[in-house]
Amino acid sequence: MGAPYDLTGKRFGDLEVICLDTEEMERRKKIGKCFGLYWKCKCHACGGYKTTTSGKLVSGSTKNCGCKRGSNLITHNKSKTREYQMWEDIKQKCYNPKNKSYKSFGAQGITVCDEWKNDFEKFFVWYKEECKRNKRGDSIIVLKRNRYVFSPDNCYLEPLRKASREAEYVLLNKRFGKLTVTNFHKRIMFFGKEMLVWNCHCDCGNDIKVLEPNLIKHHVTSCGCNFDKYKDDKFLEIKKKRLSSIFRGMYSRCYDQSSDHYIYYGSAGITICDEWLYDGEKFITWALDNGYEIGLSIERKDITKGYSPENCEWIAKEAQARNKSSNVFIKFKNEVHYLAEWGEKLNMDGQAAKKYLLEHGGRIVDNPNIDNREMIEFNVKGKK
């Protein structure tokens, strides 16, 4: 082969060319995807091997086998293993609020020890030693009962076929509002997903069966005795469904980072008080006791503060529009109204009213319902 094309022994970044990879070239020719000469190279960064083309080597687009794509070379060639995925999974459960299992782990105060959290190699060594000591193949890591830290002393391995049975003891004897979980009832398929059903004992003496998600999310915290005093209301069930939907919307805006409205609520420091957050039925009973009717919307009196009994009320949707942070307020002849109200007063549409008022001495002012500094800060956060 001509000298200009012989790259054997040459170094390109971390790759050293060993030889021409004729087997790879023949394989690619059979499938019609052979693009030039293919060289087998050794990566001096991690000791791995890679086959690539002359063009990618000479142009500098390929300088290593791919081991430097991540910041941690220790986990190279292990990121696709079951052990690495297990290590990532327990961290996600404990520290990522968007993870489906976070409410059962991180939200309950369960963490990962520093030894494992910052070093995959130590977790990997522990896992292999446990597998060897117990003579087990593929297993799953399980946290011992009444332990709150994933660590070598607090964990053990269960074979995959038995690991799911551990879920039947996770909520045992835990309290959710007035309910105490007494024992596991059965597994059911609910909209194509397997869910657990628990037997629960209420403080009033009744026993009920509750789906696990309704317990964990605090949607059901009694046998229904919380609503006994409203049993004469023929629209009670409709109101409860509507209020549950409102509560889910509040939760999404304040805590779900994937929500379109999170940037205006959660990122601006708006939260739900603990009284409601950990007992959804208390929110419903508060609403029924404080004038909720079908068609009303929840409104925060001070839009810089979160959702709580002291800061919330029920108003019509038309009135709720007054406190939106995007409203334009105009002061004219010592009167301050937002644009839609001026339009009604002048019998004009909003933009026409704005033009008329500004031409006759009116001026745009800040929302009078909140502090000017907080208003600016809230709007800046909302634009990001």
Image (spheres, rainbow, N blue to C red):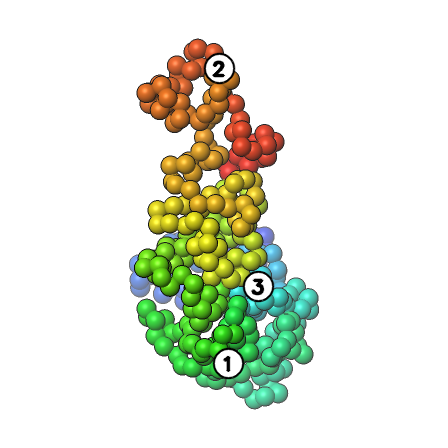
Q: Is residue 178 above or below residue 378?
A: below
Q: Is residue 128 above or below residue 39?
A: below
Disc 2 packing (10 Å; few <14; some 14–19; many ≥20): few
The residue shown at (39%, 16%) is: 355
Q: Which mark is residue 107?
A: 3
Q: Which mark is residue 182?
A: 1
Residue 268: x and y, percent?
55, 43
The residue mark sitting in front, 1 or 2, is 2
Is residue 187 found left or right of 79 in the rendered image?
left
Task: Indicate the secondary structure of the residue bearing disc 1.
Answer: strand
- Give how far apart the Cα atoms at labels 1 and 2 are: 67 Å
User: Considering only order in the chain, which callout, 3 or 2, is on the residue closer to the N terminus?
Assistant: 3
Q: Answer yes or no: is residue 89 visible.
A: no
The residue shown at (45%, 77%) is: 206
Residue placed most toward the observer, 44 or 313: 313
Quadrant the N terminus occupies? bottom left
